[in-house]
Amino acid sequence: MEYDVIIIGSGPGGYTGAIRCAQLGLKTAIIEKYPALGGTCLNVGCIPSKALLDSSEHYYNAAHTFTQHGIKLDNLQVDLAQMISRKQDVVDQTTKGIAFLMKKNKIDTFYGLGSFVDAHTVKIAKTDGGEETIKGKNIVIATGSKPLSFPSMPVDKKRIITSTEALKLEQVPKHMIIIGAGVIGAELGSVYARLGGKVSFVEFFDSMIPTMDKTMGKELQKAIKKLGADFYFNHKVTQVENKGDEVVVSVDTPDGKQITLTGDYCLVSVGRRPYTDGLNLEAAGLKTDAKGKVEVDNNLRTSVPHIYALGDVIRGAMLAHKAEEEGTFIAETIAGQKPHIHYRLIPNVVYTWPEVAAVGYTEEEVKQQGIPYKTGSFPFKALGRARASMDIDGLVKVLAHKETDEILGVHIIGPRAADMIAEAVVAMEFRASAEDVSRMSHAHPTYTEAFKEACLAATDNRAINM
């Protein structure tokens, strides 16, 4: 069988690209290694983790804030099995929805491991044991990533686990030691801390979410510390051992000493690696760089012009919505259009509570690049809507060019930051100034008023409610 486009991998980038290809009249096939479509994001990443984050937040509020709202409960308990079951229901509904979209758009779906035979031919080792070969005028590599680990922290999926296993534990950990305080570690750590478990973060760098603006890391640490978490920054893990019913983590401290932490689970959350295992890239004339990424040009073409790659297997942030934009970009490029992606304006989100969301430059980046800038910030505790909902942790921080007032970066930690950041993306796509946003009417009372107030603060320190 011959196709205009073959897409290997059905994560957000793969399935979005497939749908856009079909919309543009291209005969499209998609290949998925696992029994369900959706990739890491829908099956063991974005969607299931958000389901557990919401469940744990409901429990935490029931235990700690409901009485202040005038709601009394007796005999409150965690039913982790039900939480995990609900999470799986959400996953199943979502992946079935993707399968429906494939049928609706007349996209041929193949389940099995896809590998290159040559630059136009892909062999599919089917999950039922059979084998099939298809040809494509264009081929897209969208195979995503896997959790990263090191020899000193051997993952056994029992006591030494990755995010995949952390999403289906049978009991709330008594003490979960998390190696890495980045996005995944922060999210899953907050889940189990809110459910009553002890959580300790061991981080090689000097703050939580170290790739984001430093202010966000400091504020997030304050919030998660209220859950009883411990933090070991500038610490290096040298060894992790499964001792049966417990895990022992050996750690080098900043002053050269060594300490050990003991818990019942150790979550290895040190990043992810591009996943191209079994693709047989060499048969297509391709190879990966030193970091395992597939190299692409500005049109997402590999060194073989009709083969494209997207998402976690190429340069840039490993974000589902980045991959989605790239899937659409490739489809429209193949169809002869001239699509656009502004990578600096792809937002980043941490779904803890408070949520963290950011777009554009961090303050550290504008300093490093010598860009003249000014800042404005506004705390949620000064916002009527936040006080009404008792979500007063966090702030909005706006960076603007000192001379032109153009918004350079927006960093939010607070309630519904993940949704609020879209307003900043729209403003920055149209190169709005801080004053432009400050003169737009924002409904009262809303959380987004904090963005307007932060822009007012960046415009000659004009915040009204602070």
Image (tube, rainbow, N blue to C red):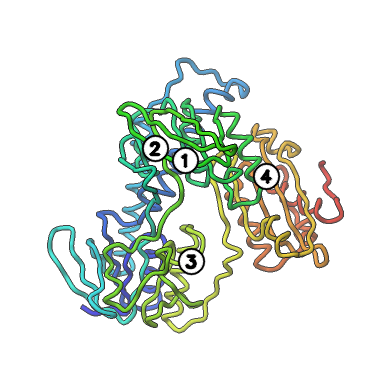
Q: Residue furthest left?
A: 130
Visible in this render: residue 55? no
> Alpha carbon of mark 2 to alpha carbon of mark 4: how far?
43 Å
The vertical placement of 11 against 349, above or below, is below
Callout 4 touching callout 3 (CB < 8 Å): no
In the image as oriented, which residue stretches furthest toward the top? 74
State yes or no: discs 2 and 1 in contact (Cβ < 8 Å): yes
Q: Quadrant of residue 295?
A: bottom left
Residue assigned mark 1: 237
Please identify the quarter of the rendering in which residue 17 is found: bottom left
Q: Quadrant of the C terminus?
A: top right
Q: Which amino acid type is shown beneath numbered disc 3?
A: Arg
Point 34% across, 58% down: residue = 98
**Mark 3 residue crowding within 10 angstroms, few (<14) / some (14–19) / many (20+):** some
C-alpha span from label 4 to label 3: 34 Å
Mark 2, residue position: 240
Q: Secondary structure at mark 3?
A: loop
Disc 4 secondary structure class: loop
Residue 228 seen by the camera: yes
Q: Nearer the viewer, mark 2 or mark 3?
A: 2
Query: What's the mark number on residue 315?
Result: 3
The residue that label 4 is drawn on is: 447
Q: Nearer the viewer, residue 225 or 414?
A: 225
Q: Return the x and y of residue 403 as percentages of the image width and height.
A: 83, 66
Find the distance from the CA under tag 1 to the CA under tag 4.
Answer: 40 Å
Amino acid tagged 4: Tyr
Which of the marked residues, 1 or 3, is nearer the chain's N terminus? 1
Dot 2, crowdedness within 10 Å: few (<14), some or many (≥20)? many
- Are the two marked residues, 1 and 4, in contact with CB atoms closer than 8 angstroms? no
On screen, residue 358 versus residue 204, left or right, reads right
Q: How many marks?
A: 4
